Image (cartoon, rainbow, N blue to C red):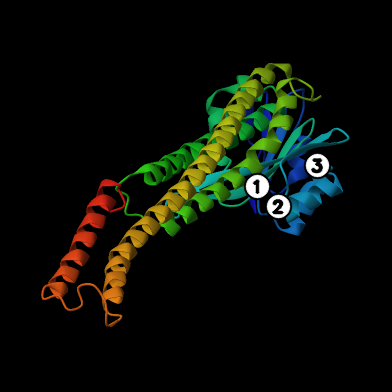
């Protein structure tokens, strides 16, 4: 559906007597340098997207990508038009999971068309924020709108990384807590689930670094030079998010390795205890077996105190072994 459409003249939103879907009238209102139309679509139908493509001259391949979605973050040029794909991320507290969406941006000399998929990354706040700043930034043209969109999405990356860091800290504390009562399998499953969420974030953050770097470095024609410092700020935030994601991934890998080492150590400790317990049974059983062989000429066989001696011998051996195992840390 069409979320919003507006003409910005010299950085100020201008009202025109036309419906939001009358793209041709909106675009005809562009009169001077810096004026542009900003059209926002949310999961549009094929007909809605086709109408926008006809009005703004959008390239067929980019339109197909925008309709199908599930694209990798990228920046492509089709003639005078730029096509930017961004992955939107948001954190769901109830399930400790990262959800993803997409924002696909068409930028031309006098227009910006955004196609949004997914519940997150609503762009209405971007419009409101840019309009509230006054006409200075929006008067720089479509690249100012693209900056606002990229800035909000990258800021959301930072928020997601903060939440994942909290989850990683909890996992790390659980792994190294000497009094933990968490099920071993549950800890392993949570580490694996977190690594999957981090992999999802990596797929959104890392491919976007090069397109944003090109914007920040001024390598993209059609971007107003006055907007470049804003893109450099976005690139800095994106770099921090990417480095944080890498650190979290390494931290979880180390935590998982430590977790597996603890499981191995626990299994060794359990085997020592089982072996010690078996020894306490095996040795008395051996003594009882020797004295139960019923040979005629056995020492102590006819001794009056032989039975008591065998029992005391068994008890002494068991106590001695128990004391030794306890001092050795096997119990």
Question: Of tags 3 and 2, which is closer to the observer?
Answer: 2
Q: Is residue 51 visible?
A: no
Q: Are marks 2 and 1 in contact (CB under 8 Å)?
A: yes
* Mark 1: few/some/many CA within 10 Å (<14, 14-19, 20+): many
Q: Is residue 172 visible?
A: yes
Q: Residue at x 78, y 36 (%)?
A: 28
Q: Residue at x 55, y 47 (%)?
A: 195
The one nearer the camera, 193 or 266, is: 266
Q: Which residue is mark 3?
A: 56
The one nearer the camera, 17 or 86, is: 86
Q: CA distance from mark 3 to mark 1?
A: 21 Å
Q: Are marks 3 and 2 in contact (CB under 8 Å)?
A: no
Rendered image quadrant of residue 240 = top right
Tell which circle, 2 or 1, labels the residue nearer the N-terminal end: 2
Secondary element at tag 3: helix
Q: Residue at x 75, y 44 (%)?
A: 23
Tell which circle, 3 or 1, labels the residue nearer the N-terminal end: 3
Note whether 266 is above or below 209 in the view shown.
below
The one nearer the camera, 172 or 124, is: 172
Secondary element at tag 2: loop
- Give residue 70's mark: 2
- Give residue 102's mark: 1
Rendered image quadrant of residue 108 = top right
- Give residue 241's mark: none
Secondary element at tag 1: strand
Question: Of tags 3 and 1, which is closer to the observer?
Answer: 1
- How far across and how far down the image is residue 157, in percent? 56, 37
Tell which circle, 3 or 2, labels the residue nearer the N-terminal end: 3
The one nearer the camera, 190 or 32, is: 190
- How far across and how far down the image is residue 208, in percent? 69, 35
């Amino acid at each position: 559906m069409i979320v919003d459409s507006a003409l910005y003249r010299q950085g100020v939103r201008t009202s025109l007597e036309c419906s939001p879907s009358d793209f041709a009238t909106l675009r005809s209102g562009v009169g001077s340098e810096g004026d542009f139309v900003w059209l926002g679509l949310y999961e549009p139908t094929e007909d809605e997207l086709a109408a926008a493509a006809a009005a703004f001259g959008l390239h067929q391949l980019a339109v197909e990508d925008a309709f199908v979605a599930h694209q990798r973050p990228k920046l492509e040029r089709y003639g005078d038009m730029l096509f930017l794909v961004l992955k939107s991320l948001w954190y769901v507290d109830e399930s400790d999971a990262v959800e993803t969406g997409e924002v696909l941006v068409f930028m031309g000399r006098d227009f910006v068309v955004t196609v949004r998929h997914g519940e997150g990354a609503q762009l209405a706040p971007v419009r409101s924020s840019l309009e509230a700043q006054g006409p200075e930034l929006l008067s720089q043209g479509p690249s100012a709108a693209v900056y606002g969109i990229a800035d909000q999405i990258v800021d959301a990356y930072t928020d997601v990384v903060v939440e994942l860091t909290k989850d990683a800290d909890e996992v790390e504390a659980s792994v190294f807590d000497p009094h933990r009562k968490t099920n071993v399998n549950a800890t392993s499953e949570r580490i694996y689930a977190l690594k999957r969420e981090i992999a999802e974030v990596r797929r959104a953050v890392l491919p976007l670094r090069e397109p944003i770097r090109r914007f920040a470095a001024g390598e993209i024609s059609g971007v107003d030079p006055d907007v470049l410092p804003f893109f450099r700020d976005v690139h800095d935030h994106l770099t921090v998010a990417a480095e944080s994601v890498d650190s979290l991934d390494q931290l979880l890998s180390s935590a998982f390795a430590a977790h597996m080492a603890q499981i191995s150590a626990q299994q060794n400790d359990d085997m020592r205890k089982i072996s010690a317990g078996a020894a306490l049974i095996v040795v008395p059983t051996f003594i009882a077996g020797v004295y139960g062989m019923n040979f005629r000429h056995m020492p102590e066989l006819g001794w009056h105190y032989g039975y008591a001696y065998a029992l005391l011998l068994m008890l002494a051996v068991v106590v001695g072994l128990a004391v030794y195992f306890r001092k050795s840390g096997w119990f």
